Every structure is written in C-alpha cells, then in structure tokens.
Amino acid sequence: EQWFAQGSSWKGKKVLVTAGGTIERLDPVRFLTNDSSGKMGFAIAEAAVNRGADVTVIAARIQGEPAAGIHVVRVESAEQMLEEVLSRFDDMDIVIKAAAVADYRPIARADSKLKKKSDRLVIELERTTDILQTIGQRKKGQFIVGFAAETEQVEHYAMDKLIRKNCDLIVANDVSVEGAGFNGDTNIVHLFGQEGRIASWPMLQKSEVAHRLLTLIAERITDKGDRG
Ligand code: CTP
Ligand code: CA
C-alpha cells in the first residue's frame, strides 16, 4: 500500500467529493434548498488536490468560486447528484459526501410559474433517494466518508448513519453550536468509525479540518490494507 499519512502523495488516487446544498424546484423560478455553502466540501477537494489526487466535485448550490485544479460538475437536484455520483462511483478510491442533500422534493414540478390562488397552499413532498446509502450498498473497496449534521444526540445519530449507510467514516457536526456546520469558515467535528468515536477536534478552520480528515483517511486505508 502506497497510502501514507502526513505529507505524502495521493498521486493517481481518484477522489469524488459532493458539496453544497441541492435545489429542488417547484416551478421555473422557485425552489427549496438549505444553508449549505459548499465550503467544507471544497476545502476537502482542495486538500486532496494538494496531495496530488485526481479530484472531482459534484457541486450543487455553493458560495464562491472553486479553486483551480478541481474538476467540478454542477448539478441542482438530489436526483441529478445521484446520477453523477453513480456514473463515477466504480472508478473511485475515496468518496466524501459533504453535500447537504434534500431529504424531500416537491412531488410535482410546474412547467410554468405557479399563480397565487387560494389563501393557503399545501405543497406535497416525497422522499429523495439517499445517495450515501445507495453507494454504501454498492461499495467494492471504496473508502466512503459520510457527514452528519445533528442538533442533539450527535454520537447516537452519527453511529446510526454510519452503520445504516455502510460508511467507513462519519464526520459529524453539531450544527446547534456556534462555529460549527453549514456557513462560516470554521467547523467543530466529531469523527466516528465502525468501532465508535475516533476523535473530537476543537474549532478549526475548514481547511485544517480538511487536512486532518485526509490524514485520518490515509491512516485508516493503510491499516485496512495491513489487515488483509
Ligand atoms: N445524504 C445523501 N442523500 C440524501 C440525504 C443525505 O447522500 N438523500 C448524505 C449526506 O450527503 C450526508 C449524510 O447522508 O453525507 C448524512 O446526511 P444527514 O442529513 O445528516 O442525514 P440523513 O440520513 O438525511 O438523516 P436526517 O436528515 O433525518 O438526520
Ligand atoms: Ca438529511
């Protein structure tokens, strides 16, 4: 195994990152989305490029412009993100799912702008496909990292997602804490593996979280290789 931790090369390694908040359209001019900025995902992508990896980002709604050297594929909806992830998944070494994917989408999407009529409007939503769970089921040696945004019982929900979605690592952030999560340039994360909590890092710049995360991934891939 040529996966080493700190400071060494990820040359030839294929990394897929998802970033940003998906957009689920109601009509041509209106959509449902969330507060994700894409900053965490792009910080990870940039850190992987710096280690020499071949990096593709499937990006939904994001703030700012991605750094050079990253292959970016733009999408809107959860369904489009699913397609772009699945079409590349088999070739990947590492997949990092930092995107904030809509859990529900409008059942109907109007082709022309909706006109106001009654005093109340009920919009019916249906579940989207869970991208992380789908790739977890198809996993053939890829190292899969999921994210978990929680406001309570972080460990309990993070471990549940790790097991249910067959991930190798979960990066959980308590989005109720100042300095963690969606917007902003910092994050406070807790790392979980199959064995439970691995680490809890203090508030760090997202670039530093990205760097530490890649080091942790490299260590765990090397360990996996060593075991057989
Ligand atoms: N995720 C996904 N596809 C979805 C929903 C979520 O791939 N349709 C991924 C996210 O990209 C993230 C992880 O699942 O890596 C966890 O997302 P999160 O919203 O925290 O968890 P959910 O499983 O959606 O559960 P809930 O929102 O109910 O907490
Ligand atoms: Ca969700």
Image (cartoon, helix red, strand yellow):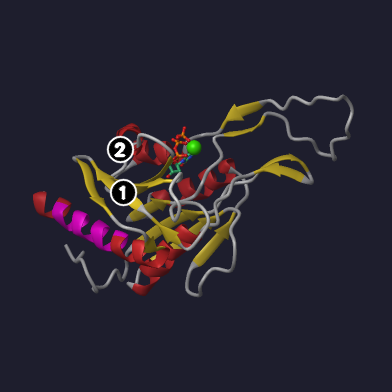
Cα distance in 3D space between marks 1 and 2: 8 Å
Q: Could you tell me which secondary element the residue under label 1 belongs to?
A: strand
Which residue is drawn at the image coordinates 30% and 38% (left, top)? 155
Is residue 163 at least partly visible in the picture?
A: yes
Magenta region includes residue 214:
yes
Residue located beneath label 2 in the image: 155
Establish if 185 lies above or below 97.
Answer: below
Q: Could you tell me which secondary element the residue under label 2 belongs to?
A: helix
Left or right, residue 191 beside residue 122: left
- Mark 1–mark 2 CB contact (< 8 Å): yes
Residue 43 placed where, x, y %?
43, 65
Which residue is drawn at the image coordinates 48% and 49% (left, top)? 85
Left or right, residue 131 beside residue 119: left
| Amino acid at dot 1 | His
Which residue is drawn at the image coordinates 31% and 48% (left, top)? 190
Q: Which residues are magenta?
A: 213-223
Residue located beneath label 1 in the image: 190
| Amino acid at dot 2 | Glu
Magenta region includes residue 68:
no
The disc, 1 or 2, on the residue closer to the chain's N-terminal end is: 2
Establish if 17 lies above or below 50.
Answer: above
